[in-house]
Amino acid sequence: MEWPLFATFNERKARTIETHMQYQKKGISNQTLLALYERMLKPRMVEEKMLILLRQGKVSKWFSGIGQEAISVGVASAMLPDEYILPMHRNLGVFTTREIPLYRLFSQWQGKAGGFTKGRDRSFHFGTQDYNIVGMISHLGPQLGVADGIALADLIQERKKVTAVFTGEGGTSEGDFHEALNIASVWNLPVLFCIENNGYGLSTPTKEQYNCENLSDKGIGYGMESYTIDGNNILEVYSKLDTLCKEIRENPRPVLLEFKTFRMRGHEEASGTKYVPDEVMDIWAKKDPIENYERFLLKEELLDVAHIDAIKSNIETEINAHLQLAFDEKEISSAEPNELADVFKEFSYEESSPSTGIQNVRLVDAISQGLRQSMEKHENLVIMGQDIAEYGGVFKITDGFINDFGKDRVRNTPICESGIIAAAMGLSINGMKAVVEMQFADFASSGFNPIVNYLAKSHYRWGEKADVVIRMPCGGDVGAGPFHSQTNEAWFTKTPGLKVIYPAFPYDAKGLLATAINDPNPVLFFEHKALYRTVYQDVPSNYYTLPFGKASLLKEGRDISIVTYGAAVHWALETLEQQPEINADLLDLRTLQPLDIEAVYFSVKKTGKLIILQEDSLFGGIASDISSSVMENCFEFLDAPVIRVGSLETPIPFAKTLENNYLPKSRFKSELLNLIAY
Ligand SMILES: Cc1ncc(C[n+]2csc(CCOP(=O)(O)OP(=O)(O)O)c2C)c(N)n1
């Protein structure tokens, strides 16, 4: 046979699969053989209906998985219903095999309340604990790390379960893929990494996506077992997955699977397939997973035409009835209180007061104690971070923890912030709590995507909490230059769905950390490095909590309000010590989200003047928002403009003279005196 001149890799792939498109029953029961057929047919028929509705303008967007059904169905059929699957946008067969009622899917796609996201997210971007499915976010890669966390929870609790996570071959180019596979291998997590290699990313062919023969070959580099599977052959998929799942439940380990298949339609319907040579389409059309399998079942006399017609007619009736249910549902209505109420999971703060004993300790000791006592209180709490186990962390916060809590719960991680934060989300999904230590807050930029897109948005999108605390050793005045000195809280206060805590004293830090860990929502917990070993305070030895959203009034005065947080609280205190004639309210915010803006208003209404001091550079910081809120709500009470004092609009420099000039410490006193004299 003559092969057309197109990408050699596709040619080779087509040739291999054509010769392998043979079905072997491998001891699979007739009942299962038939069930696999029906399970593939259902998503195909739903999709065909969707394509009609799309043309009629009744559905806005569609990502087709036509031609790839054997993968979703084969994987989902080999797994137990209580094992987690993390599908992508072409895995309708996962949702239908898990028997989600079709009307709920239709409602989801129409943005109606009967779906899974109250109209807040589209298509397959949802999860459901009822069906042990955790849907994707648009960024493709982060869910690979989430699967690691889910599997880690199973491994720690010895549950003998498998987790399966999907990615396209395009998604394997993301760092998330590398991080997730590396973590799974180092920790030996029971995860099936399923790559659906369908020939193209959005329009980019495989040869421009990666430069190796098979993606499964990458398993060698990760020290991971891997297989290449004909993704259009349902029996090959199912039998391999069935064997692997049974093995992995007994002998946990990660496995990389590359399913060779093809995307028969556009990336989404509007984008078409012009860039795909016709010959390639023709070859793959002959490999259709359903038509071929149907022919096999007919040949085996497990099916006849009448039976096929009956199955199709039943599915069609089901689709039409469920579509009607979804169409009959009214458009979703917007009520602001409902929208705001779902950003965070409800958390009722429980006051825990210390019973006995006071010690004079440093900030670093208070945090360490607080973390240790939370580890004692919550048996399902896991701490992860770089060098935190035997070494005790670079700031020694977790020194000795490994002896008391063991290596399962105090985990050294590879250097991969994104993968670990995603894994923390997975732990939370699977019933555990996680604290992640950033070695330095600056490195949260390498985990930014899962923080602001996954953790922050999950509860609003599909009601799933993110029971994760990210500890952020931060801040300047330590001569450590642009990448070890930032105070980057404003990266996160901007994002709805995150709580941001920033204590300035040992007592606050210990109590607020305990609350952060109790709170099922994602919390960024800032710890100023310059305060770690310089600030001492009498702190209760026992466990206690402090509430979020309550500023602390450190000094009371009549003439001016000083509002600040973190290390800047101490700069303000020093200034007031040097200028005892200043009669000021000094408010330490302690928590930035939630923010105690009422305490600020209260003070401003008394003094008529407000100066806000922040360590971060000025533009876009919390000071700007406080200033606007005060102008909007307390204008009549102001006797002078609100003044913000922050760092220069430059990155934070290394040399001490430069850093001193960058930080607002030296400018604060004159700005304060000017405002008093206004
Ligand atoms: C981080 C990120 N970059 C770009 C995109 C835009 N995008 C969405 S899907 C897609 C192609 C994905 O290809 P692949 O992973 O092979 O999956 P397929 O759609 O082929 O199943 C692209 C580029 C995105 N969603 N996320």
Image: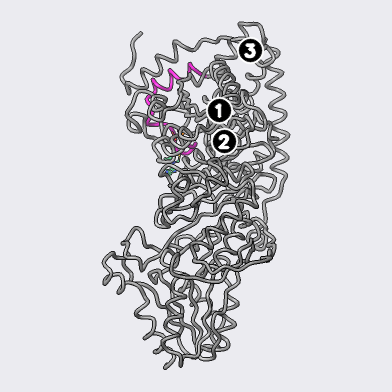
The three-letter code of the residue at mark 1 reads Pro
Ligand 1 lies in quarter? top left
Counting other residues with Cα less than 10 Å from the Cα at mark 2, is it few (<14), some (14-19), or many (20 or more)?
many
Magenta stretch encompasses residue 278: yes
315 versus 620 height, above or below: above
* Residue receiving disc 1: 252
Question: Quick check: marks 2 and 1 in contact, CB under 8 Å?
Answer: yes
Q: Is residue 217 in view?
A: yes
What range of the chain is rendered magenta? 268-288
What residue is drawn where x is 60% and y is 77%?
598
Quadrant showing the N terminus: top left
Question: Element at badge 1?
Answer: loop
Tell me which label, 3 or 1, sits earlier in the chain.
3
* Residue receiving disc 2: 151
Tell me where residue 129 sits by quadrant: top right
Question: Element at badge 3?
Answer: loop
